Amino acid sequence: GDRAEACDRFLTAWEYTLAVIPEDSTTIQEADRTTPTFLSLEAFLRSLDSDLETVAEDDHTYHKHRLDFCREVCESFPDADDELLLDFRHFVADSLSELDRTADSRAEFELLIEESPENPWAYKKLADSYWLDGADELSNEAIERTADLYQAALDVDRPLGGASMVADRLEEVEHMLADASGADHHGAKES
C-alpha cells in the first residue's frame, strides 16, 4: 500500500544484495548465480527503478535515491549487457534533470551519444532538455543544436517510438530558426 516505504525496504534489500555479491561479479548473470533471490536480479533492479520513478513524482527526494541507485547499478555491473547499462544511464540522466541539474544531465546525454551513437533516445532527450526547458530563451546556436539533435534522432537506423512527435518538434524548431534568420536579415537591411 505505501510505495515510498516499499521503495525504502527494497533499497535496503539492494544494499544487502550488494554486500553479498562477489566483487568479481561484473554482470547481472554472474551476480544472479551467486545471490539467493526470489526473482531475477535484473527484474528486481528494473522494478525498483520503476517504483522509485513513480514515488519521485510525489516525493521529489526519491529522484536522488533513484540517481544513486542507478549509478550503483552501472558501477556494480560494468560488464552487464548493453541494453541494461544504456537504460540505467538514461535513468541517471533523467534523474539529474529532475533534480534541476540540467548541465550534468546534458553532459550525461552527450556521453551517451558519443558512446552509443545509434541510440535515438539520447539525441531526443538532449534536444528536449533545450526545447522543453525554455524554447523562448534559446540562442540561435542552441536552437540550431536542438534542430540537429532532433534530426539525428530521426536519422538513426534504430526505431524511435514517438518519431512523429520528434518530427513535429523539429518542424517547430526549424520555424523558430527561420523566424530568427528572417528577423536578423530584416534588421540588417534596416541598418
Image (tube, grey):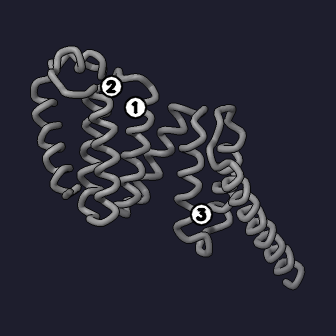
Q: Is residue 25 above or below residue 43?
A: above
> Three-letter amino acid code at disc 1?
Leu
Depth order, front residue of 55/106:
55
Q: Is residue 19 above or below residue 161?
A: above
Residue 23: percent from the left, percent from the top?
A: 16, 19
Element under label 1?
A: helix
Residue 152: percent from the left, percent from the top?
A: 68, 43
Question: Which of the labelled discs sits on residue 154, or is there none?
Answer: none
* Residue behind mark 2: 78
Label 2 close to label 1 by CB (< 8 Å): yes
Residue 42: percent from the left, percent from the top?
A: 32, 29
Q: Quadrant of the C terminus?
A: bottom right
Label 3 close to label 1 by CB (< 8 Å): no
Element under label 2?
A: loop
* Residue behind mark 3: 131
Mark 2 to mark 1: distance in Å? 8 Å
Depth order, front residue of 160/92:
160
Residue lying at 41% horizontally and 57% vertically, measured from the top left: 97
Residue lying at 55% horizontally and 71% vertically, measured from the top left: 134
Mark 3 to mark 1: distance in Å? 26 Å
> Three-letter amino acid code at disc 3?
Trp
Label 2 neighbour load within 10 Å: few <14, some 14-19, many 20+: some
Label 1 neighbour load within 10 Å: few <14, some 14-19, many 20+: some
Numbered circles on residues, count = 3
Mark 3 to mark 2: distance in Å? 32 Å
Query: Horizontally, is 114 left or right of 171 in the view?
Result: left
Element under label 3?
A: helix
